[in-house]
Image (cartoon, rainbow, N blue to C red):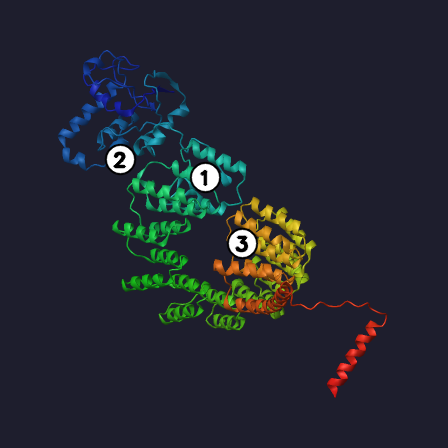
Amino acid sequence: MALKYLCFPSSSSSLPLLFNGFHHSPKLQLFGNGCPKHPIPFSLYTAPPFLPLNPSSSHSSTTPIFLPFLQEEGEEEDRVIKQDPESNQSEPQEDDLESMEDPILRFFKLRARSQDPDPGCEGKLSLQNKHRATSWHLAPDAAVGSVEETEIDFKLGFKDEEKQLGSNSLDSSPEIKGVVGEILLIARNVPENATLGELLGPYEGKVGQKECVEALGLMGQEGLEPSLITPRACSLLFPILGRAGKGDALMVLVRNLPNTKQFRDVHVYNAAISGLMYCRRYDDALKIYDTMETDNVQPDQLTCSIMITIMRKNGRSAKDAWEFFERMNRKGVNWSLEVLGSLVKSFCDEGLRKEALILQSEVERKGIASNAIVYNTLMDAYGKSNQVEEAEGLFSEMKAKGIKPTSATYNILMDAYSRRMQPEIIEKLILEMEYTGLEPNVKSYTCLISAYGRQRKMSDLAADAFLRMKKLGIKPTSHSYTALIHAYSVGGWHEKAFMAFENMQREGIKPSMETYTALLDAFRRAGDIQMLMKVWKLMISEKVEGTRVTFNILLDGFAKQGHYSDARDVVCEFGKIGLQPTVMTYNMLMNAYARGGQESKLPQLLNEMSALNLTPDSITYSTMIYAYVRVRDFSRAFFYHKKMVRSGKVPDPKSYQKLREILDVKAKIKNRKDRKALVGIINSNMGMLKSKIKRKKDEFWKNNKKQSRIRTSARVGH
């Protein structure tokens, strides 16, 4: 049996103090009669308890039982060192340690030879309680074999400080297997500039709710909680929230960002501003920019581009956008393609196309070449203003500079020619796209369908273009179906228009407001009031709000068929959603009342217009004049003609010439009748009229007239 000494100190820093505290203590013989015996092996598991630094205080402590062995062996070693110091230094440490039988002595010899006499805690156990009492008992024989292991542990040391301090180490916790263990291993080794979400991408769909909760709990125990609030995460999250319409959630996150330097980054602010722009929170975006200036964050070109876009969408003028750029330029923000594109778009939206061209040329002189996006913006502005020749010139200039046109470039040109109803040019542009390696998309064929559909006799060609698109594997959109329905509407095929609408719903494509408007126009042209009412109710059930064009189509459809009460209901319904009646509204009502023979209602509608501060235009007066001419009420027709001339609301020369010709003919007839009536009145007043003798008619007076006529014609023939 071996005597086992167990002690539990709180720190290993007291180990070297064992020699200092007991150099002059008397010898103590253990289990002997004064004669030294062979030392009994000990099993040491921890360092001795804490000893005071003061040597005098050490005498009052417990009697040192290890001291006799240490002093005897220490004196012999000192003598050996004095006799032959060089040979002692040349001997390897392993031979000295093997020659010593006492393990405790070998431990202290190893400690004394180490370069660091007082390293960190190297005990096998480290307890937090500083007042631990020592415990003595005889160890079993099996415990003696653990001395060699203890020596190795002391010689090699332990692995790291967390294991020595007794914290929750990985070795003490059971090994976790499965998906949770793999996630935990990844969380322990997340590299810098990477997020845990990026590394866990392969596990998507493989982890259930239970595993997620377990993994988060274990990560929390080890202090590995994933930080979701990082600058990079914010830069990715803010635009996504904006596109999803979560402006309130975005503002909450921005207000609660950590007030640290890493979050005062221009990329984080740009992401927040762009997210608010996507969900149309322009005022909040301006507030974020003000906060950015308050925090002294230097804006960049992207900040300037986003802010100019927000100003444009918020209704600010191009002049304000230019002044903002000049202010940013003074702060060190130079020209870039993003800034140029935003300014050109602002200028083009206000119709300042020439100014946009001048700006583009000036920036190119500074060394910033325009790209396809800038040219597309300019071409779209000229195409929508029906200046297709200028758009073609920009297209040629673009190709001359070596800028490759994109699909959007060709689609812009196709849309311009579609407005001009020139489908043959669109066919050539599609062939040119295929020749350059660009595949025509759904927008290209939609322009072709619209170009054919705008012409009354080409509805079948529009249907052929639609079928050709589907044959190529291009899936139609709501705009494609809208163009096809409009083509059927113009061609008078309202049944096919409704069939196309049903096919659209069958394919799972949600009809848009434009689709419903085109379908309503088809039934308006056909005069089918029942289907018109049915489609309108379907719009209301689907919660699709119409525009003013929808409003006018419904009104005209009901009014022309004599459903004046339904037409008035349409006016009230659209007034509830903020669409008040306009001059065009009353013009359509007047036209419907005039066609229905209710011209007496026209002055009442004119009074309603004046009550709503609506000024009648030339169409209003022309509608009233034609209505009264139709019923031969020339006095009212001439009255409103004079009123139209005095107000300056004269129609175009061609329409006015037609109106004057009708009025001149009616005026001649009226003047001739008025002249005869006037002469008769004058002669009657002056007594110049001969009194007619009324004779009694006999029963043969009709035959007498016929005979007199026959005689007169015979005389003329002779």
In the picture, the quarter occupied by the C terminus is bottom right
Nearer to me, 626 or 277? 626
Label 3 neighbour load within 10 Å: few <14, some 14-19, many 20+: some
In the picture, the quarter occupied by the N terminus is top left
In the drawing, does residue 209 fall left or right of residue 250?
right
Label 1 neighbour load within 10 Å: few <14, some 14-19, many 20+: some
Residue 500 in view here: no
Q: Secondary structure at mark 1?
A: helix
Q: Amino acid at mark 3?
A: Val
In the drawing, does residue 20 fall left or right of residue 381?
left
Q: Amino acid at mark 2?
A: Glu
Checking the image for residue 94, the label placed there is 2
- For the residues labelled 3 and 2, the Cα–Cα distance comes to 110 Å
Residue at 71% across / 67% down in the picture?
A: 691
Query: Residue at the front extreme?
Result: 687
Query: Residue at the right extreme?
Result: 699
Residue 111 in view here: yes
In front: label 1 or label 3: 3
Q: Which residue is mark 1?
A: 248
